[in-house]
Image (cartoon, helix red, strand yellow):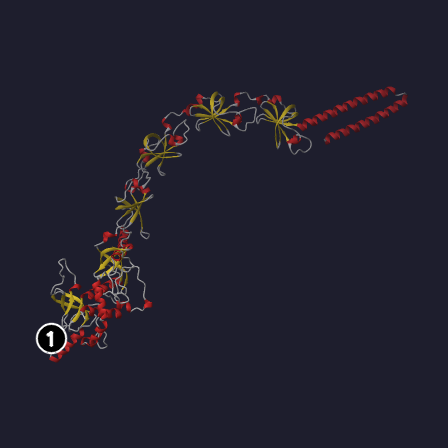
Amino acid sequence: MNEDAKKEQVLTQEVQSEEDVTLVETDTDHKEVLPPSPTEADEESPEDVTDVVDAEDESTSAPDESEPADESSVEADEESPEKATDVINAEDELTSTSEEHASSPGDEEAPGSDDEETPPPDSPTETPDFWSDDEDLQPEELLEAYDETLKSFQEGHIVKGTVVKVDQDDILVDIGYKSEGYIPISEFDVGEDGLPSIQVGDSIDVYLVHREDADGLIVLSKEIADQKLIWDEITQAYEEGRPIQATVIKRIKGGLRADIGTMRAFLPASQVDIKPAQDLDQFIGQQLEMKVIKLSRRRRNIVLSRRVLLEEELAARKAELLSTLQVGSVISGEVKNITQFGAFVDLGGVDGLLHKSDMSWGRVNHPSEKVKVGQEIEVMILQVDREGEKVSLGLKQKNPDPWMEVDERYPIGSRVKGRVVNIVDYGAFIELEEGVEGLLHVSEMSWTRRIVHPNRVFKRGDEIEAIVLDIDRNSQRISLGLRQLQENPWATINERYPVGSKIRGKVRNLTDFGAFVEVEEGIDGLIHVSDLSWAKRVVNPVEVLKENDEVEVVVLSIDADNQRISLGLKQVEPDPWIQVPEQYKVGSVVQGTIVNLTNFGAFAKLEEGVEGLIHISELADHHVNKPEEVVAVGQILDLKVISLDPIERRIGLSLKAYLNEQNRAQVDQYRDTNRRSQQQQQQQQEEERPGLLGALLQEELNQAQARRQKQQEEEEEREQEEE
């Protein structure tokens, strides 16, 4: 049996007892392991990236207890077909080798004996110094010391050895045992010249596979010792949470493969950097400091993270920086990102927000107008929230506020120059200097022109002159005027168009409440709907006027401060109501034509421009629900004037009063006629009455007739009163 097979057998026993790291590779069914195909080698994934566990390690787990492969398993070792075949051959000799070692003298002192202590397997065993006082020992003592020396070398432990010979194929190592051991040169690193880097006299750590083989030599392995030491170092780093050095070898599916000594590990792409790395190839060949975030000795699975370490370092720098930041201090930083509302500045571990309102005392439409990504700038600390890890920065605060002495630089009434920086519906903003803007309201742009929108007068970037009208330093507002640069035509409007004068103009616009007439260019007067006609009640101006009509009007009033002129159209003709009090006295009877009916009565036209109201209660003696029951439009009636108000231009008419008056006249006429008839009859009777008797009888008759006439008059008076 060759040495590789013996090492394989011992390593198998180690894995079965301790579930420790394994070196050789076989498949689960102990069949020959084929080399990976080119496709498999090139397209490795976290699921495929796992070192091949030896057959004995897999055999320790029952078939129903097998665990699925971890998604972050490391890449499989790329062993050659020859090595895999050697391993298979070694397994075939496993039974015979076990029998040989069972009968060997060295196996009687195997690790785990009841009568001796086993040193820790994870640290090299130092060779005891039993020969320092050998001159004072007796032969029996020397023999006993020799036996103790042999017992101190335990199989499965790591011991210190010294290189005593370097051959072409093997390295001879002395560990202080009764014989030296050979280690294949393939287990040592080879330099650029193809020769092993080991030299005679070098002290190395080796793994004691067997204390004695069939040839009486000890079986050693440097590769197993290195892997055990590396595993112990990785395990300790994982448990203590400290970083470890790893070299990135190549890019695989899902991340990178890294080597920790002779152990392979997996570095997921999400754990390479704090932000997703766009180019993973840049890390190949670099030795990086990382943390072990997952470890499985049984599966030989090592997952690394560089991101965790960077985040910890960043958090430490951020906490240190936040503790030193002071409000009001000026610090340098690099513009990291630009948004619509501001820019984020890297202060060396902490990102601060520079809002666009704090970039300049002037107008900033977009942060990119003031800063660029990657630009180094100096900013002032405005606010620090250490708990929330937020920092507010300012750029304009490094310079004095231009509004502090603005009233001294731009006194009210002074003429200033500026540039149009913004136009809105209600005006234009004029920049007088950086950080100082004034508003030119649309109403202050012209004395006479009707400006619908400021963009019809200005555009952005125009240089203009204006007059300072008002300054509010606390609110940071300046009111500007453009029309003040010219003479105000309204200042002399009273002189040009005195009240009562007649002028001619063109109807420019009609509204529900009246008509606008152009007095002169830029100045319009209003004819209210009530001033359009004396004669008719005008509901809408379109009943009388049309746009562009030339009309003659009278100036009724002028308000120069509010820039208003009141005009009248009906005032051109004399007021017909001047003669109304003389023509239509209360109690007189007039003739009128019904022109309009309402729910409260009827309007009667007496003459052109003069109308009177017949209230519904004055239409008839009986109750009237609707005027249509008594009168109709166009009907001509005789009416009685019952009230008159020249100031309010109102005349009260009554149809009922007129009819009652006519009835009383007819009754009086009837009475007069009846009275004259009775008197004539009485006179005739008196002439025909004979003698005294006849005179007495005639007197009695006259008295009876007088009584009847009196009763009749009383009845008529009662009837009239009732009516």
The one of 302 and 597 positioned closer to us in this rendering: 302
Location of residue 400 in the rendering, given as x and y in whole percent from the top left corner: 29, 40
In the rendered view, tell whether residue 330 sits above or below residue 223. Answer: above
The one of 695 and 633 positioned closer to us in this rendering: 633
Local crowd at mark 1 within 10 Å, few (<14), some, or many (≥20)? few
Task: Determine the residue positioned at 73% across, 30% down.
Answer: 721
In the rendered view, tell whether residue 478 sits above or below residue 587. Answer: below
* Residue marked by disc 1: 133
The one of 622 and 288 positioned closer to us in this rendering: 288
In the rendered view, tell whether residue 49 sits above or below residue 515. Answer: below
Q: Residue 666 is drawn in which quadrant?
A: top right
Does residue 7 appear to the left or right of 456 in the view shown?
A: left
Task: Determine the residue positioned at 73% across, 29% down.
Answer: 720
Location of residue 176 in the rendering, given as x and y in whole percent from the top left corner: 14, 71
**Residue 112 seen from this side:** yes
Location of residue 383 in the rendering, given as x and y in whole percent from the top left corner: 31, 47
- Element carrying mark 1: loop
**Residue 414 seen from this side:** no
Residue type beneath disc 1:
Asp
Location of residue 515 in the rendering, given as x and y in whole percent from the top left corner: 49, 27
